[in-house]
Image (spheres, helix red, strand yellow):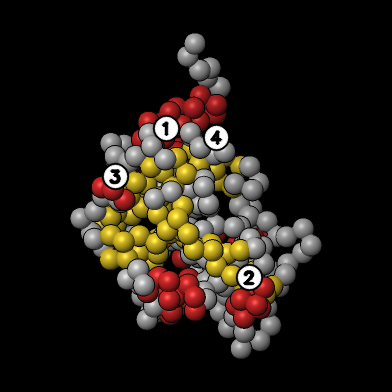
């Protein structure tokens, strides 16, 4: 039986003879149903019309779908002391991509920031022998294709190795997660933020959104929690959710200023002269 993929958010669902009436992720207020109504595709149909773009994004290797599909995010391949990590996921897996990543050591685990990027996570895991997928348990209700390789972690921090730690940063979703890599490319610390901290178009700030496409800001109490959890954490670069949407250099200062800018806006305070 087919495993239907929502054409708006790119999430793959469990096997079914007929597609669901609605994608639960898209019918939630953080996302949206496509303007033409709910539509579906399959992995096979997606592969016939799209390919994977595999190329550097900043200092990391990005994997995304072209022509653009779904949200559209790109994943990142990280060679760390925790093993080779696929951070985030996309809806398409191809033999060419599998070969390209195997040439770089393959994938040992997958970690995903929140449900909008679950996409075809089980397809990716299966392609590399059923590697574990780390999701925060607070978002378990959004899993649309259950599988034994899903590892639901709890609490506010999960240390995967000496250098790699997942931090829960709620606001967009209760389990929204960032990945901190203490010794990233060139030995620099980096923060992989997904859109828990949403890099904005000037690429000098981040913002904090409950819904990105529907322009609903995150609750200030949640943003205070994010600020406290990231306090003192060093990072030079901040990688956002899609190609080029990154802060390269000065990331820690940019995020600190962004917290202050956000609170000035939501609290009605003026910036210092």
Q: Earlier in the sequence, mark 2 or mark 3?
A: 2
Above or below, 217 against 94 in this view is: above
CA distance separating discs 1 and 2: 36 Å
- Mark 3: which secondary structure? loop
Q: In terms of sequence position, does the residue under pointer 3 or pointer 1 come before the other?
A: 3
Residue 115 place in picture, x, y as percent? 51, 61
In terms of sequence position, does the residue under pointer 4 or pointer 3 come before the other? Answer: 3
Where is 179 relative to 111, above or below?
Answer: above
Q: Position of residue 50 (x, y in %)?
A: 63, 70
Q: Which residue is mark 4?
A: 202
Name the quadrant containing residue 51.
Answer: bottom right
Towards the viewer: 246 or 179: 246
User: Cα distance, mark 3 to mark 1?
Assistant: 16 Å
77 and 175: which one is in front? 77
Which disc number belongs to residue 50?
2
Question: Which residue occupies the extreme right position in the image?
Answer: 36
Residues at marks 2 and 4 touching, judged by CB atoms closer than 8 Å? no
In this rendering, position of residue 156 left or right of residue 45: left
Packing grade of label 1 (10 A; few <14, some 14-19, many >=20) is some
Tell me the number on the disc at residue 254: 1
Q: At numbered mark 2, what does the secondary structure look like: helix, strand or loop? A: loop
- Residue 195 disc label: none
List x then y, in percent, for residue 120: 52, 71
Marks 3 and 1: which is nearer the front?
Answer: 3
Task: Say whether disc 2 or disc 4 marks the residue closer to the N-terminus.
Answer: 2
Residues 100 and 27: in front is 100
Residue, disc 3? 188
């Amino acid at each position: 039986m087919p495993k239907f993929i929502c054409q708006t958010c790119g999430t793959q669902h469990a096997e079914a003879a007929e597609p669901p009436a609605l994608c639960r992720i898209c019918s939630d207020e953080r996302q949206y149903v496509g303007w033409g109504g709910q539509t579906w595709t399959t992995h096979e149909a997606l592969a016939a019309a799209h390919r994977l773009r595999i190329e550097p994004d900043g200092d990391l290797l990005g994997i995304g779908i072209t022509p653009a599909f779904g949200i559209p995010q790109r994943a990142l391949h990280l060679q760390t002391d925790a093993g080779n990590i696929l951070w985030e996921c996309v809806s398409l897996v191809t033999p060419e991509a599998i070969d390209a990543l195997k040439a770089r050591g393959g994938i040992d685990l997958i970690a995903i920031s929140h449900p909008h990027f679950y996409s075809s996570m089980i397809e990716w895991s299966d392609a590399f022998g059923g590697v574990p997928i780390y999701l925060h348990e607070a978002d378990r209700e959004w899993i649309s294709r259950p599988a034994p390789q899903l590892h639901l972690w709890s609490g506010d921090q999960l240390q995967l190795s000496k250098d790699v730690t997942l931090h829960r940063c709620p606001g967009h979703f209760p389990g929204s997660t960032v990945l901190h890599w203490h010794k990233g490319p060139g030995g620099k610390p980096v923060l992989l933020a997904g859109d828990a901290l949403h890099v904005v178009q000037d690429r000098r700030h981040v913002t904090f959104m409950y819904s990105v496409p529907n322009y609903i800001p995150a609750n200030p109490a949640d943003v205070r929690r994010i600020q406290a959890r990231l306090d003192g954490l060093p990072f030079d670069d901040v990688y956002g959710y899609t190609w080029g949407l990154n802060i390269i250099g000065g990331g820690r200062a940019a995020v600190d200023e962004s917290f202050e800018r956000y609170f000035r806006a939501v609290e009605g305070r003026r910036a210092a002269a």
